[in-house]
Amino acid sequence: MIKGYGQKTEYIWYVSLFFMFSGLYMLFSQSERIKYYFGRLFPCYRKKHIIETAFIRQHDSSRKRITLIAAWLTGFSIFFGGLCGTLYPTMLQNAASYSPYDLVYSQIFGMNQAEDYKIQNLLKQNGIVVKEVKQVNYLRDRAFNMLPASQVNKEFGCNYQIDPGQFLNIFQYELDDGYNHEMIPMKQLNFNCGRENLKLKSAGSDIRILFNGNPTFADYTLVLNDTDYNKLAIDYHECWKGTIKLYAFDEWKNSGKGIQAVQRYLFQNNHIKQQEQNHYYKASSKIETFTIEKQSAQFLIFLMSFIMALFCGASSTMVYFKIKGEAEEEQRMLFGLYRIGITPEEMLNIIQYKNICYFMPQSILGICIGVFYNYTVSRIYGYQMTAVAFSLIIGFVLAAVQLAGTITYSRKELYSFGFLI
């Protein structure tokens, strides 16, 4: 099961749910036998709590069903809480991984034609120190970004050796980002270069993030031999020539104002509508990507917290109404015990024992469910131990709150029956 999650098998979630429900059902169906063996192992405990045990056995079958559903709700509330604890750093890490440069824009279709020194002056005026500026020429048609191998090797530190007549597929993905990626390499391409066609064959593929994503880029990226690239630049009339500008800052976390100034400058120079600028020619920046991911993660935490509260409240409410439905019968039993000499303090112990048996199994089983699912799912991101830690913390906090609430409620329940301590 855990191996299946690590391999991102799509159906494993449904299989695990089936086994979870089946296992819980089998556990509760054999609860009487478990209690029997527990009583044989600890006979003193069974004798000490014989009245309490008899008190709760009368509604044992219906209590099992309620506990089963409540454990499921509690378990998934713990799972959602632990998942937030791992998704938050994962989303921020992905934002940094997919934005290796602090500012990226593309000069293509006659847009974003700005001199480097003007961009650097704008950034300097906003307190940003530019460490490095790179540029890479590229061709773009309706499907591909095509880059020359020599420039890719020089600017990105690669060592691609591509023979004439071949191309390399580049998949700009982070494999541990938690998403499924369709990486289907192109095997052969045919470009119409006037009188003759240029046929290229695949030299393989590489998974590497070379530069940030940008609206001006096509969906697929290829690296070509310089000879083929130059031929396409001259004879392939269905492509556009462009230049990728890549900026690295000394400190990107305080670059928000500088990025906004660059965005305004590019927009003013392009003389197009704001909507068109944002949709097609907007510059990409690490700070913007990071901020969006951070806000998304914070909203996710808020949403999951609401779901956690809803699930935990639903599980406790189910048990509460189950207890209220049995209150009249319990009151008659307590009055009978009172007539034979049971004190209110002993009654309180009986009620606390009964309520703990009603409320606490869902918390214990919920911790097991939440820890298991958080460990297995978070293996995709490499945060499995962090997920376990978050799940245990959340689970034990919920269990402590549940226990404290159960003890308080037990005293109030005894008062409602007319007994005072």
Image (tube, rainbow, N blue to C red):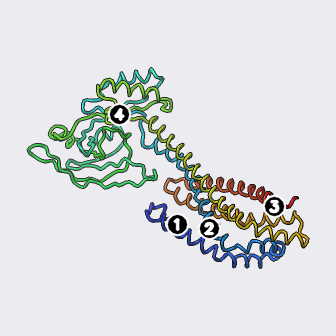
Question: Residue 383, relative to residue 356: is it above or below?
Answer: above
Q: CA distance from mark 3 to mark 1?
A: 39 Å
Q: Earlier in the sequence, mark 2 or mark 1?
A: 1
Q: CA distance from mark 4 to mark 3?
A: 66 Å
Any mark on residue 17, and which?
A: 1
Q: CA distance from mark 1 to mark 4?
A: 43 Å
Crowd rating for badge 1 (residues with CA inside 10 Å; few <14, some 14–19, many 20+) = few
- The spot of residue 100 in percent (x, y) is 42, 39
Q: Earlier in the sequence, mark 4 or mark 2?
A: 2
Question: Nearest the camera: 358 or 297?
Answer: 358
- The spot of residue 273 in percent (x, y) is 31, 29
Determine whether label 4 and label 2 are within 8 Å by CB: no
Determine whether label 2 and label 1 are within 8 Å by CB: no
Q: Earlier in the sequence, mark 1 or mark 4?
A: 1
Determine whether label 4 and label 3 are within 8 Å by CB: no
Crowd rating for badge 2 (residues with CA inside 10 Å; few <14, some 14–19, many 20+) = many
Any mark on residue 215, and which?
A: none
**Which of the two discs, 2 and 1, sits closer to the camera?**
2
Q: Measuring 33% from the left and 41% from the top, which residue is drawn there?
A: 153
The amino acid type of the residue labelled 4 equals: Asn
Q: CA distance from mark 2 to mark 3?
A: 26 Å
Residue that badge 2 annotates: 68
Residue that badge 4 annotates: 278
**Which of the two discs, 4 and 3, sits closer to the camera?**
3
Residue that badge 3 annotates: 414
